Image (cartoon, helix red, strand yellow):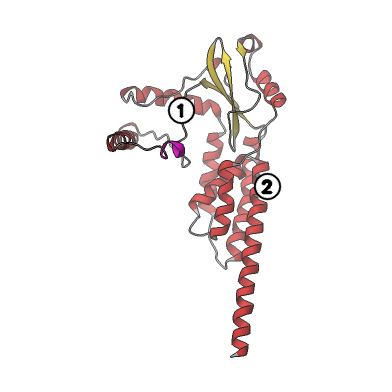
């Protein structure tokens, strides 16, 4: 009996040590990914959603921090990148460029400004993002495999990372995104409840996307506000109609797993 109790205590202690090790490993990953930005950070965000039932809960909770955490470029670097990408004659029309980003994510950051007197935003891609996608994902895949190996599990991540690489390379092409925005704006003319930003092609490039500034609220903030049954029904109806149009009429889907 004493030997059995000792074995149980040893087993529990071993589990606790493994737990601490996994949390420490996840925290190190979050720190590394938030500094890397780009593909690795984006993949880490998706991991916390897609593999929440596979990874340890404590690891998922640490990875979820990536949704609200990213470092950003200093203003001097932002201004320098924009000047390199925008024709000098167009640059003269730009004023009131915000010192700090109004949003920052894994692929790039957003700054507000005025262009010819109109309120605009610049989505500016972090330097080297597109070129680092394959190498970043290779690093993350090794980390993911080590995390699942700690639990004695073996998961084939091949298809996940293959699809992720394809989509991240598309996401890093702002010319493609600009064309998609224009296409969706045309499609959504029949659904007036939705608003799509205007693209300013003259001051956009493959790594800089200029759009009209649109007021709005993050979805996860909006859902906290009390609403009447009629408002909830209207919202649900609009979203269902959009989804049906995308899949069964247009064959074009504009979506994001994050609120």
Tell me where residue 34 sits by quadrant.
top right
Residue 209 spot, x, y in % from top left: 56, 24
Taking depth in this image into account, of 233 and 121 the one nearest to the observer is: 233
Local SS, label 2: helix
Q: Residues within 10 Å of mark 1 (few under 14, many from 20)?
A: few
Whether residue 1 is situated above or below residue 143 in the rendered picture = below
Of callouts 2 and 1, the N-terminal one: 2
Question: Can residue 220 be found in the magenta stretch?
Answer: yes
Q: Residue at x 66, y 11 (%)?
A: 88
Circle on res. 128 = none
Disc 1 element? loop
Q: Residue 32, which numbered label?
A: 2
Residue at point 62% right, 82% down? 7
Relative horizontal placement of residue 121, taking residue 129 as reference (left or right): left
Quadrant occupied by the N terminus: bottom right
Q: Residue 250 or 6: which is nearer the viewer?
A: 6
Q: Which residues are magenta?
A: 219-224
Along the horizontal axis of the image, is 72 left or right of 220?
right
Indicate the position of residue 122 as horizontal and vertical percent values. Answer: 58, 23
Query: Who is closer to the viewer here, 84 or 47?
Result: 47
Q: Nearer the viewer, mark 2 or mark 1?
A: 1
Q: To which residue does mark 1 refer? A: 216
């Amino acid at each position: 009996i004493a030997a059995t109790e000792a074995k149980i205590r040893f087993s529990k202690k071993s589990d606790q040590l493994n737990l601490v090790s996994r949390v420490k490993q996840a925290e190190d990953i979050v720190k590394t990914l938030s500094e890397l930005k780009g593909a690795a950070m984006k993949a880490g965000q998706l991991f916390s959603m897609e593999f929440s039932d596979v990874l340890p809960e404590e690891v998922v909770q640490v990875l979820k921090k990536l949704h609200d955490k990213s470092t950003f470029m200093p203003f001097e670097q932002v201004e320098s990148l924009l000047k390199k990408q925008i024709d000098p004659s167009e640059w003269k029309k730009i004023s009131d460029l915000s010192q700090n980003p109004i949003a920052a994510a894994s692929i790039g950051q957003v700054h507000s400004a005025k262009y010819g007197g109109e309120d605009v935003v610049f989505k500016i891609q972090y330097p080297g993002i597109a070129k680092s996608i394959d190498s970043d994902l290779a690093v993350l895949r090794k980390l993911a495999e080590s995390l699942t190996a700690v639990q004695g599990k073996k998961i084939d991540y091949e298809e996940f990372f293959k699809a992720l690489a394809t989509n991240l390379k598309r996401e890093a092409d702002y010319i493609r995104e600009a064309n998609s925005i224009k296409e969706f704006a045309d499609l959504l003319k029949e659904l007036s409840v939705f608003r799509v930003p205007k693209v300013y092609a003259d001051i956009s490039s493959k790594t800089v996307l200029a759009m009209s500034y649109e007021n709005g609220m993050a979805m996860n903030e909006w859902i906290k506000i009390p609403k009447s049954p009629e408002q909830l029904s209207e919202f649900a109806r609009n979203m269902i109609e959009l989804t049906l149009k995308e899949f069964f009429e247009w064959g074009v889907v504009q979506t994001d797993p994050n609120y």
